[in-house]
Amino acid sequence: MLEFYQQMAQALRQDSVVLTTVVSVTGSVPREVGAKMLVCRDRAIGTIGGGAGEAKVIRQALQVLATGEKQFVEIDLSGALQRETQGVCGGAMQVWLERWSGNEAIKLIKQIIEILSSSGRGTLVTPFSGDSQPYLEFGDNEPHSPQGLPKARHKEHKENEAFREILVPLPTLLIVGAGHVAVPLAAIAAMIGFRVTVVDDRAEFATRERFPQAAEVIVQSLTFALKCGVNSQYVALVTRGIQHDLEALRLLLQQPAQYIGMIGSRKRVRLVCQQLQQEGYSPEVLASLYAPIGLDIGALTPEEIAVSICAELIKVRRGGTGKSLSDPVTTTVLT
């Protein structure tokens, strides 16, 4: 979301834009409450699900861009034959369209970017009444999910209401080790919404040229570097050996984290855990490690391994199951 607002800031400096936001969902839909798309005169940035439903929103957004009149757009994804539908997901989405323009809008976007880039927190309030503009509240009185997203509302919004979104910084991913797997891992993790920090004691590996997407690249002894990023919520150990794993875990296991994953064979993982258990770490603490790291997708190359790690990061962050989404397809032949 940070990158989205950064793109919105750039677009606003050139012209007015229309911000489209999913504010209500029912049933099965392609995007969550809070999903956004920006519509400019010549392009759209982001997506609220694609297909005919998104095309409908873009058409309406261009009208809002011309008139400035805010509006709701209903997207029917029920697939019902007797209704005009924009898809067959099974549910429905309500999307709010509002034109943003001028210095006040740019100022508000800068504040949002500052919140998302720091350790701050705020609530973006979008009133639905015609003469009220979006604004920020500071403090957290709005219920929200563990991922910091607003809870889905399973009802339609009324015109005298407002949509409230909790703004929280990106979750941080600390990548320990700057070798071959770390390069695609940093790139993909940044793409899926993590603030990436890379640490390594080798100056020739931990460089900005190798990790342009990282927010920080720290070249220090491992213990010192880890102290700089020890509060990260997610940690991926992709080090070059067991001794580096042990050095990192002795520090990392003392701090709470949502995810600590360690690369390596099952034998390597077993040896590391045996050593740590001998040093007094409890089996319960060691069982919290995601090791070997990543979901089992048969990955072999550094890029494939990075994909498997990021898939596991998404699973942990979003509370997924890791099971296949596909079901056997049954074809009914009408005679």
Image: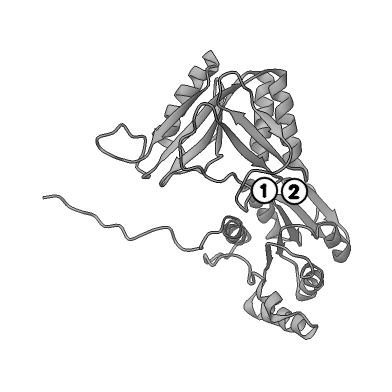
Query: Camera-side residue: 6 or 120?
Result: 120
Q: Is residue 116 left or right of residue 131?
A: right
Q: Quadrant of the N terminus?
A: top right
Is disc 2 placed on a helix, strand or loop?
Answer: loop
- Which three-letter amino acid code belongs to the residue tagged 1? Ala
Q: Which image quarter: residue 128?
A: top right
Q: Which image quarter: residue 319?
A: bottom right
Residue at position x 62%, y 22% in the image: 132
Hey, which residue is sitting farthest top in the picture?
67
Indicate the position of residue 22 as horizontal and vertical percent values. 51, 36
- Which three-letter amino acid code belongs to the residue tagged 2? Ala
Label 1 CA crowd tier, 10 Å (few <14, some 14–19, many 20+): many
Q: Which image quarter: residue 43?
A: top right
Is disc 1 placed on a helix, strand or loop?
Answer: helix
Indicate the position of residue 170 as horizontal and vertical percent values. 69, 47
Indicate the position of residue 304 as horizontal and vertical percent values. 58, 59
Which residue in the protein does label 2 denote?
A: 214
**Colour scheme of the picture:** one colour
Q: Is residue 137 left or right of residue 59?
A: right
Q: Residue 66 bears which disc, if any?
A: none
Can residue 296 be spotted in the picture?
Answer: yes
Residue at position x 20%, y 53% in the image: 332
Residue 250's place in the image compared with 207, above or below, is below
Q: Residue 190 bears which disc, if any?
A: 1
Do the CB atoms of the residues marked 1 and 2 lie less than 8 Å apart? yes
Can residue 201 be spotted in the picture?
Answer: no
Q: Reading the chain from its start, which is encountered first: label 1 or label 2?
A: 1
Residue 39's place in the image compared with 286, above or below, is above
Residue at position x 86%, y 66% in the image: 223
Indicate the position of residue 31 as horizontal and vertical percent values. 49, 43
Residue 218's place in the image compared with 26, above or below, is below
